Amino acid sequence: MISDEEPFQISVPDDAIALLKRKLEDTRFPDEVEDPGWDYGAPLADIKRLTERWRNGYDWRAQERELNALPMFTRNIEVEGYGSLNVQYVHKRSTVEGAIPLLFVHGWPGSFIEVTKLLPLLTASSPDHPSFHVVAPSLPGYAWSEGVLKKGFQGKHYAELFNKLMVSLGYTEYVTQGGDRGRLLTLTTASIYGPKHVKASHTNAPVAEPLTFRRNPFRFIKYMVTPYSAQEVQAAADAERFLRVGAGYSLEHSTKPQTIGYSLEDSPVGLLAWIYEKLVAWTDAYPWTDDEVLTWISIYWFSRAGPTASVRIYYELAKSNESLRFPEISVPFGISIFPKEVVRSPRAFLSAKASIVFESEHEAGGHFAAWEQPEALASDLRAMFGKYGPAANVVSGCSGY
Amino acid sequence: MPEETPFKIAVPDDALSLLQRKLADTRLPDEVEGAGWDYGTPLSDIKRLVDRWRGGYDWHAHERELNQHLPMFTRDIEVDGFGVLNMHYVHKKSKVAGAVPVLFVHGWPGSFIEVSKILPLLTAGGAGHPSFHVVAPSLPGFGWSEAAHKPGFRGTHYAELFNKLMLSLGYSEYVTQGGDWGHVITRILASQYGPKHVKASHTNMPICSTDIFGTFRNNPLRFAKYLLTPYTPREREGMARSRMFQKTGMGYFAQQSTRPQTLGYNLGDSPVGLLAWIYEKIGPGTDNYPWTDDEVLTWISIYWFSRAGPSASTRIYYELSKSEEVFRTPRTSVPVGISFFPKEVFHAPRELLRAELNVVFESEHDAGGHFAAYEKPEALVDDLRRMFGRGGPAAGVVPGHSGF
């Protein structure tokens, strides 16, 4: 039986909207060198257009109403050493009683909004594919989840939080799906709470640390003598480029989150540019509408804890050395590889860390797979967990049908 | 003396009222308990500085002071491929006609203000020490200098710009002093225009080129000595400081050298954002320099009210990182003087510097940090007087301008 849930509706106060408008009206734009394209960062013409739309034309209340159509709730979850955290989450049950409980975890600069398109697909009932009960929390410090103001909130604390959330909702056994930060956090949950609670994990962010001779001598040797596939060659080039020119935000978040925080908290156009640069860089020619972009950013702007809270996760996970790690898991693991995902590790790194029971490679799509390619991702999850799939019936009594 | 257009800073009223409106609407973040400086600029400092900036801090008074004490000018200089750039600079001649012309180049997040304390000391005449004519420009995109409008403004262009500035002021032979970007730019200047125009260089930020093999080829014996000489305690301390900075303090560098425009929207639009970004470096970057709040706010206001806006100032990181000039500063035979201040964040082993450059003067200090000209003006000027004075290793480098 599901215990009490507090239904939640987003309701940004009028004076917060008025403050945003005032700030937007007083926006002071920088100059730009001639014809920079995207080389120096988000182009001025884009940012000017988006700022103008945000100031005049974009209707937050309409977007808020749309978001409120998602079944959202809040709940207090106790995390050892951190007291009680109030977590906001989306929770939708399928009509299929034996649907598979699935925990979906977003990252930065995403949010709970990323589950929106997947939700109807995953909870749909059909004899041809499994159905899921979906739980999609906002990470602490994101959207309307409370932030953490005590140092050291690491992977294991997120894991505790998520596991307690799922168990409190009556899902003592469940599977996970995560991208970006969600990858590490769901895999950490699987590592600590699987196979007892977490039965399987899926990610669209195929990242794992490099093989070393010391840890896996045979695999390492095999890896050294096996030629790269064409995709792996491309992936290595993409990753190198990302680290060379696209990772400044990550170093800043990981070392001085408070410093960049003052800008993100105080400047709408600053927050917009900081996030928009990645929404474009990390997607596969996704046709963002201006209002879509502005809603993604408004969630950060109007968030309960403020934008600064959202970047602290980088600092804490860097300090605990977890950022690029692949935790040891013993449960079945599935990956969906989208061509424009930012970092795509060689297959050999991933198979050294987990038993890959499901793998799918796509022709289109980037970092925000659930938003860009919801049918493809849903299809992958259905194939992985379906009747004849490699992770069929992992959750006792929940075949999905 | 060629004509100079005098310049006075005169920030318009509407710029001041915009700043006030923005400050009144400042939205501050929360902070992790016990964060200190670990997570970035502390909230308590920022709150105090914002409150002061809003009420109490008088920009007009500081503007007046800058205008009164610093003789400033502007001048159009043509740079190959970039057209004309209008340059803002401080220029003060000594009463001593044979004073040594010195070009002083600031860095980031500094400005022309860094010359203000050494200016009267350098230009002062005296029997026992040399005197200097001082030229201190604002880098393009800083202070009231126009920013380059095209991509690709590299080290060679800065060098061309500043050499032309000195020549246009009648100084065909001169010496240079620089820290931070000033170090990199004066190195490139010396390599391109020395020893014909640039006769000697002095720096307070000792960094080595990453081109270690080049250094070895340049001076194999000296390089061998470097390999064999154990580090002194000072060197070890300095390098530990450098390593710490590399590990925890390079976020700004990574962002500015890859996506300066994205950051620029923040710095241009948010006074508190700009304040925090810069104060993170000037607060801890000195050797316990007793910054007053108004001093800090003046340093930041120069960026806020700058001609090109704060964003433009970050592009130097992008351009010079792309061209690797910040890592592989060129070799030069021009004599070099180095002042070592213990709390400088960038350090290099002494022997390696001696292998890389023609080091003729060295001075070790017990106190002082990155902003030497501002923190330790007397010490820095004393070093320059000794380097260029009678009997000094660079005495008389500029013919006809011994300083006496």
Image: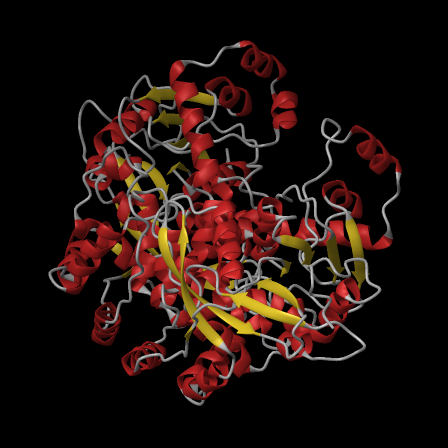
Q: Position of residue B263 (x, y in %)?
A: 45, 60
Position of residue A1 relative to residue B180, above or below, is below
Q: Is residue B18 above or below residue A60?
A: above
Q: Is residue B191 visible?
A: yes
Viewer-proximal residue among A171 and B334:
A171
Tell me how many marks there are.
0
From the viewer's perspective, is B290 left or right of B156?
left
Could you say which is closer to the camera, residue B56 or residue B327? B56
Residue B193 left/right relative to A119 = left
Q: Residue furthest right?
A: A226
Quarter holding the C terminus of chain B is top left
Q: Quadrant of residue B17?
A: bottom left
Colour mapping used in the image: secondary structure
Q: Residue A101 at what x, y percent from top left? A: 63, 65
Extreme left residue here? B56
Which residue sits at x=38%, y=20%?
A: B362
In the rendered image, residue B259, in percent from the top left (x then y), is placed at 53, 58
In this view, the residue in front, A27 or B137, is: A27
Depicted B66 relative to depicted B214: above or below: below
Q: Is residue B50 left or right of residue B257?
A: left
**Residue at image location 53% in from the left, 76% down from the top:** A293
Left or right placement of residue A3 versus residue A224 in this view: left
Locate residue B75: give its quadrant.
bottom left
Q: Is residue A60 above or below residue B224?
A: below
Residue A130: image x %, image y %?
A: 74, 71
Q: Residue at x 51, y 72 (%)?
A: A90
* Residue A304 picture quarter: bottom left
